[in-house]
Image (cartoon, grey):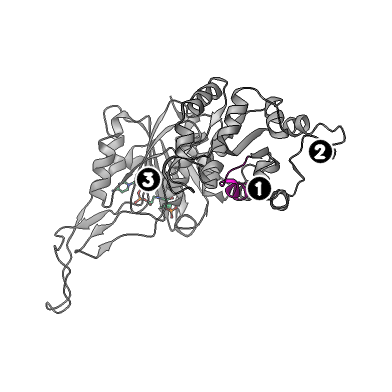
Amino acid sequence: MDLHDKSIVIGVTGGIAAYKAAELVRLLRKAGASVRVAMTEAATHFVTPTTFQGLSGQPVYVDQWDARMPNAMAHIDLSRQADLIVVAPASADFLARIAHGMANDLLATMVLARDCPLLLAPAMNRQMWENPATQRNVRQLQDDGIGLLGPACGEQACGEVGAGRMLEPEEILEEIRVFFTPKILAGRKVLMTAGPTFEAIDAVRGITNLSSGRMGYALASAARAAGAEVTLVSGPVAFQAPAGVDRVNVRSALEMHAAVMARAAAADVFIAVAAVADYRVAEVAEHKLKKDQGGVPPIRLVENPDILAEVAALPAPPFCVGFAAESQNLEDYAQKKRAKKKIPLIAGNLIQDGFGGDDNRLVLFDANGAHPLPPASKLALARQLLEHVARLLP
Ligand code: PMT
């Protein structure tokens, strides 16, 4: 519910991607935002106003002569009530009209008369996008301080492949979240680990754990939204990297160690969320171990490097944040880990709260003692943890 105090107008222009705007409205409502929809007449040929009315729970405006607003000034009233206008999809025609300050339908008039920020999510055929006229309009819009979301590259409805696809609704939602997030980490480089590691036993088997990656990915997303440049060194998880985050895929603790140590000196903040295997298999069998080779195969383990402790021991270390998942004595064990690894901050969570799932409970431990955070979604906790980090940063 992190957009619950936000009022957003979604503008929909004519294009096949208009159907995705319906999902965007649904996601925004789910995130708590109040949403109003204004459409161009062309957009109504792709999706009906009734669909958007049902999803937004509000009347939908198309016609600039619509008399439902008591003062008959929908173009003014809609934008005055909004914290943000997002036009998705924004057609080539719409970009051209806004770049030239035209006010020839309700949506364009509302955009021209707005007193709130505007984001446009272009969607068009790749040649329309590459056309010098469109590119000229895009430059003009950027010069006017209007935010462009995408477009993405890929297969288009017309069957061609190239730039011009509208971002997916989830990506636009993420950009809207980013837009509203205070930039408390602007200019900072944040390096993070997330997920489990996988320590091979043979060609198919290995030792791993139940970390889903959710806590780390939520932190990566929140750090990026807070203005940081984020590199996420990730063990094997099922998620895509959050938009705008540089993801480095690794499998084993040794790979994670190498990827982190190559980047740690350049980072301002290092957050170790990964559940790293403490041990790896000393001799990994090249082929699959066979059951009929006589008895239970012996598996000798050797200790993995402690990535967090090594980063904290660098001559000029980044600000280091650790995590501790414990089944009991959270404060005692977490504080001992913080002292042993010589780090300023550690976030403790109980195993039953932290692993898997969308929610968690965190207690932050620093030199001033314990700071319990109320139970919440991993994303909400990630934001609070980063606020704490920002306060402690030099
Ligand atoms: O991924 P999710 O399902 O969302 O679950 C999130 C989580 C429970 C995995 C996460 O919130 C968490 O607690 N991660 C740390 C797990 C843990 O207990 O780690 P540890 O006690 O083994 O290590 C302490 C700290 O040192 C951690 O920051 C860890 O990343 C780091 N470490 C540990 C060992 C090692 N070889 N290198 C390390 O950097």
The span shown in magenta is 13-25
The amino acid at mark 2 is: Asp
Residue 324 appears in view: yes
Residue situated furthest right in the rendering? 70
Amino acid type assigned to the residue bearing label 1 in the image: His
**Distance from Cα at disc 1 to Cα at disc 2:** 18 Å
Is 16 colored magenta in this rendering?
A: yes
User: Residue beneath label 2, please?
Assistant: 66
Please report whichever mark, 2 or 3, sits nearer to the chain's N-terminal start: 2
Q: Nearer the viewer, residue 371 or 1?
A: 1
| SS label for mark 3 | helix
Q: Looking at the image, which residue sits at the far left?
A: 293
N-terminal-most mark, 1 or 2:
1
Of the image marks 1 and 3, the number of the one nearer the N terminus: 1
What is the CA distance from the residue labelled 2 to the residue labelled 3?
A: 66 Å
Tag 2, which secondary structure? loop
The majority secondary structure of the magenta stretch comes to helix
Asked if residue 43 lies in the magenta stretch, the reply is no
Q: Can the viewer see residue 368 in this picture?
A: no
Check contact, mark 2 vs mark 3: CB within 8 A: no
- Mark whose residue sits in front, 2 or 3: 2
In this rendering, position of residue 204 left or right of residue 273: left
Amino acid type for the residue under numbered disc 3: Lys
Q: Which mark is residue 23?
A: none
Asked whether 124 or 313 is in front, the reply is 124
> Quadrant of the rendered structure where residue 243 is?
top left
Tell me residue 147's x, y (percent): 55, 29
Please name the residue shown 63% across and 46% down the image: 28
Neighbours of disc 1 within 10 Å: few (<14), some (14-19), many (20+): some
Whether 306 is drawn above or below 227: the answer is below
For label 3, the residue is: 336
